[in-house]
Image (cartoon, grey):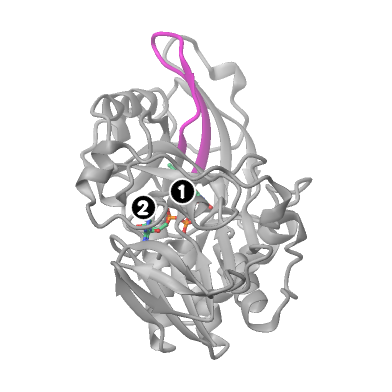
């Protein structure tokens, strides 16, 4: 069976890896570059039990375990490690000393207090998301996966419209028995090609500081800055001597070209101001990266993982919101099973069926985007 996967983020790469490892012929089509979007610019934080009580819980537990297995398998190196995780309050306006617990990171400034442990090395971990995604893609290529640079512009169908025969890539049909749409927030384009629920994109900024605390501990901070605004930065020290901080949403519509995602200049200063409330030395350190990306979201907060009803060979794997790096391995494993075997056995995909939500209208593409892309195909 020949499977065409649209998009080489963490979800596309994991699906490609598991499908190829099971013996399928796989082609991945990526418009910009492997891990060029959220899968390269996210925090890479993993938690085993933070989705308990939601339909995501089994997917998260299976994924957390698979992350450990993948890291130990020798497939590649992507800075996987377990670490402790703390809840912290910080303020530029108040003394937080009374909130401080006896334990907690010693490197916090007096303006901050760790109020509790949110996870330990049994339940929380991290990867470098870009290295993870590229590492899985490289492992998939060693299993024979073909990675193609190209833009998926539409899908091709059988004469009676009942089945997919492939995808339109840069104006030509690339034939396949099954097509998996895994274009993150850009999966919205597929609403013009298939009866799919809406997928949105929520923008977030992040800074990677050339500074790292010792010992390395992840923080989820509730932080009051000088003007009284309260933010929720997330802080992930990395084994490469840097620390990743996100927590500032961005504005602006998703550009049709992933290469056009840009930062908003003021965001860097605002992120540094937040960091200064709990780690002034880090706030003053140079930035290795200042970046923005969009996480893919659905109307009910759950991913879309499954078959598109009524069209043979059509599948979707997206909408992983804030847990796409965590949930990539079990999503990829289950999607590979579903496409190759007809059903996923490792996790129950029923809660993630795309048919649970109404199909969306085809997206409206701005004239400026269309002008930049004269090659735009059906539905884009
Ligand atoms: C600031 C921030 C921090 C985050 N932190 C964490 C975290 O700590 N832990 C966690 O688990 N999750 C985190 N997430 C969420 C996670 O990053 C995402 O859920 C995940 O990366 C989505 O992966 P994806 O493969 O679905 O999409 P993407 O990474 O967006 O990949 C989609 C790919 O499709 C390609 N594409 C787009 N259009 C086309 C086309 N027409 N043809 C071909 N290819 C196309 C794109 O170029 C891109 O490479 C974070 C998200 C954000 C925004």
Q: Is disc 2's CB within 8 Å of ligand 1?
A: yes
Q: Nearer the viewer, residue 106 or 294?
A: 294
Nearer to me, 93 or 359: 359
Quarter of the rendering occupied by the N terminus: bottom right
**Residue 134, position in %: x, y?**
37, 69
Residue span colored magenta? 218-234
102 relative to 147, above or below: above
- Mark 1 is surrounded, within 10 Å at the Cα level, by few (under 14), some (14 to 19) or many (20 or more) other residues, namely many
Q: Is residue 199 visible?
A: yes
The image quadrant that residue 239 belongs to is bottom left
Whether label 1 lies within 8 Å of ligand 1 gets the answer yes
Q: Which mark is residue 119?
A: none
- Is residue 289 something one can see in this rendering? no
Q: For mark 2, give the secondary structure.
A: loop
- In the image, residue 356 lies at what x, y percent? 73, 50
SS of the residue under disc 1: helix
Contact, mark 2 vs mark 1 (Cβ under 8 Å): yes
Which residue is painted at 45% across and 9% down in the image? 228
Between 255 and 22, the residue placed more toward the observer is 255
Residue 351 pos. (x, y %): 75, 55
The residue under the point 37% across, 78% down is 138
Q: Quadrant of residue 136?
A: bottom left
Quickly name the residue at label 1.
185
Tag in front: 2 or 1? 1
Q: Which mark is residue 37?
A: 2
- Examine the structure image and report whether residue 186 is included in the region drawn in magenta: no
Instruction: Tell me which label, 2 or 1, sits earlier in the chain.
Output: 2
Q: Quadrant of residue 361?
A: top right
Task: Give the residue at the far front of this rendering.
Answer: 160
Q: Position of residue 193 (x, y in %)?
A: 49, 57
- In the image, residue 10 sits, relative to residue 71, either above or below, namely above
In three-dimensional space, the C-alpha distance between marks 2 and 1, rounded to whole angstroms, equals 10 Å
């Amino acid at each position: 069976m020949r499977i065409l996967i649209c998009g080489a983020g963490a979800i596309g790469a994991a699906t490609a890896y598991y499908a190829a490892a099971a013996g399928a012929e796989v082609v991945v089509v990526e418009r910009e570059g492997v891990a060029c979007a959220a899968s390269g610019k996210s925090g890479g934080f993993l938690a085993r039990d933070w989705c308990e009580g939601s339909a995501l819980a089994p997917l998260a537990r299976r994924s957390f375990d698979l992350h450990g297995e993948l890291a130990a398998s020798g497939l590649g190196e992507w800075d996987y490690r377990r670490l402790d995780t703390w809840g912290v309050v910080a303020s530029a306006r108040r003394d937080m000393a009374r909130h401080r617990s006896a334990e907690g990171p010693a490197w916090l400034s007096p303006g901050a207090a760790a109020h509790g442990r949110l996870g330990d090395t049994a339940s929380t971990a991290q990867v470098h998301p870009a290295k993870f995604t590229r590492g899985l893609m490289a492992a998939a290529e060693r299993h024979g996966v073909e990675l193609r640079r190209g833009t998926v512009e539409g899908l091709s169908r059988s004469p009676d419209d009942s089945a997919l025969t492939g995808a339109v890539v840069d104006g030509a049909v690339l034939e396949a028995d099954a097509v998996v749409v895994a274009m993150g927030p850009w999966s919205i384009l597929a609403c013009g090609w298939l009866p799919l629920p809406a997928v949105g994109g929520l923008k977030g900024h992040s800074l990677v500081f050339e500074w790292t605390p010792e010992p390395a501990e992840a923080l989820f901070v509730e932080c009051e800055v000088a003007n009284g605004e309260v933010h929720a930065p997330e802080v992930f020290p990395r084994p490469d001597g840097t620390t990743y901080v996100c927590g500032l949403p961005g504005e602006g519509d998703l550009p049709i070209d992933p290469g056009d995602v840009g930062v908003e200049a003021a965001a860097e200063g605002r992120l540094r101001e937040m960091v200064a409330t709990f780690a002034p030395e880090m706030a003053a350190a140079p930035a290795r990266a200042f970046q923005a990306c969009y996480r893919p979201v659905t109307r009910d907060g759950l991913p879309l993982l499954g078959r598109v009803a009524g069209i043979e060979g059509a599948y979707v794997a997206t909408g992983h919101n804030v847990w796409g790096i965590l949930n990539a391995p079990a999503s990829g494993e289950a999607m590979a099973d579903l496409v190759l075997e007809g059903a996923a056995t490792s996790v129950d995909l029923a809660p993630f069926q795309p048919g649970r939500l109404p199909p969306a209208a085809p997206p409206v593409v701005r004239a400026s985007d269309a002008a930049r892309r004269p090659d735009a195909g059906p539905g884009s």
